[in-house]
Amino acid sequence: MTMGIDPSDLGEDDLFRELGHLYETRLEALRHASDQAYAEHTRRTAQLEAEYLRRYPGREVDPERLREGARAR
C-alpha cells in the first residue's frame, strides 16, 4: 500500500510544504513513533527529497556547507 500523493504529482508549493512538515516532525518521529510509523516517515522523506533533487539537479550549494568553507571559519 502506498501512502501519500506521488511526489511527481505535487506542485512546487505542495512539495516544499510537505518537506517542511516532515522536517518539523522528524525528531518526534525518531523519538516517539512506532517502528512502522518511523519507517513510513523515513520512506516518505526519501521520496520527497528524491523528487526535489530530480527537479533541482543543479541546486545552489552554500560554500559554507562544504568542507573548505567549514575549515575557513
Image (spheres, rainbow, N blue to C red):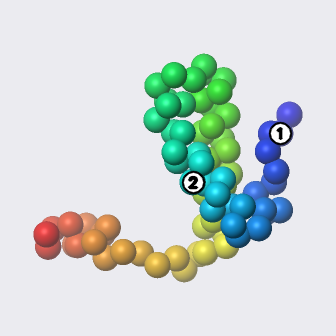
The N terminus lies in quadrant: top right
Instruction: Tell me what residue is drawn at x 67 percent, y 73 percent.
Output: 55
Residue 53 is situated, as x and y percent measured from the top left of the image, at 61, 67
Precedes in sequence: disc 1 or disc 2 = 1
Amino acid type of the residue that numbered disc 1 sits on in the rendered structure = Thr
Q: Residues within 10 Å of mark 1 (few under 14, many from 20)?
A: few
Task: Give the distance between the C-alpha atoms of the residues marked 1 and 2, in whole angstroms.
Answer: 20 Å
Position of 44 with respect to 68 (left or right) is right
Q: Is residue 17 above or below residue 71?
A: above
Residue to which mark 1 is pinned: 2
Vertical order, 36 against 68 (above or below): above
In the rendered image, which residue does mark 2 sit on? Answer: 20
Q: Secondary structure at mark 2?
A: helix
User: What mark, if any, has residue 26 been given in the picture?
Assistant: none
| Residue nearest the observer in this picture, 55 or 28 | 28
Q: Nearer the viewer, mark 1 or mark 2?
A: 2
- Mark 1 in CB contact with mark 2 (< 8 angstroms): no
Residue 10 at x, y percent in the picture = 78, 62
Q: Amino acid at mark 2?
A: Gly
Q: Position of residue 42 (x, y in %)?
A: 60, 39
Quick one: which residue is furthest to the right in this view? 1
- Residue, x 59% and y 48% (percent of image)? 21
Tag 1 secondary structure = loop
In this rendering, position of residue 30 left or right of residue 38: left
